[in-house]
Amino acid sequence: MRRNMTGDVHLKTNIFRGSDDPERAPRLSLALLRDVPHFLLGRVEGAYDITVHVLFPYLVPAQDKFTSLTKAQLSCWLNRIFHPTVYRYCEADYTQYLLVNY
């Protein structure tokens, strides 16, 4: 779950970056995809070289370079968004291998 994108795919997107001053709002800037907070969802079956990542461009990373989601961020995303969605739209034979919560 903590595996990051390392390849430089030369694609940029908007990201919010914090400043040293906590009173200032995060500022919008361009960043490579690997520097956007993300989560490795998995690999495409039959195509091992293709990975699927979920990007969180509005999540301000603690440092200038993204390393991984914190345990609190990961727990919040899995328990409040990912698991409820999977359990709602997928049948039990798919969800039986998922943990109930993070």
Image: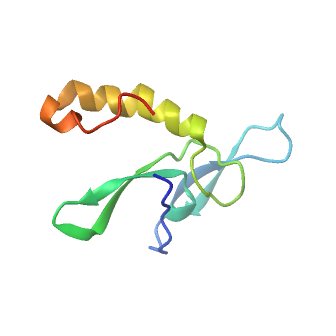
Location of the C terminus (image quadrant): top left
91 or 97: which is nearer to us?
Answer: 97
- From this viewpoint, which residue is outermost toward the right? 21
56 or 39: which is nearer to us?
Answer: 39
Q: Position of residue 61 (x, y in %)?
A: 65, 49
Q: Quadrant of residue 84?
A: top left
75 or 100: which is nearer to us?
Answer: 100
Rendered position, 10 above or below 87: below
Q: Position of residue 65 (x, y in %)?
A: 66, 61
97 or 53: which is nearer to us?
Answer: 97
User: Would residue 91 be seen by someone viewing this image from the given angle?
Assistant: no
User: Would residue 44 be seen by someone viewing this image from the given angle?
Assistant: yes
How is the model colour-coded? rainbow
Rendered position, 28 above or below 30: above
Q: Position of residue 64 (x, y in %)?
A: 71, 58
Report the residue at 46% width, 68% height from top: 11
Residue 20 located left or right of residue 26: right
Report the residue at 73% width, 46% height from top: 18
Rendered position, 90 above or below 2: above
Residue 21 located left or right of residue 67: right
Report the residue at 29% width, 29% height from top: 85
Rendered position, 65 above or below 16: below
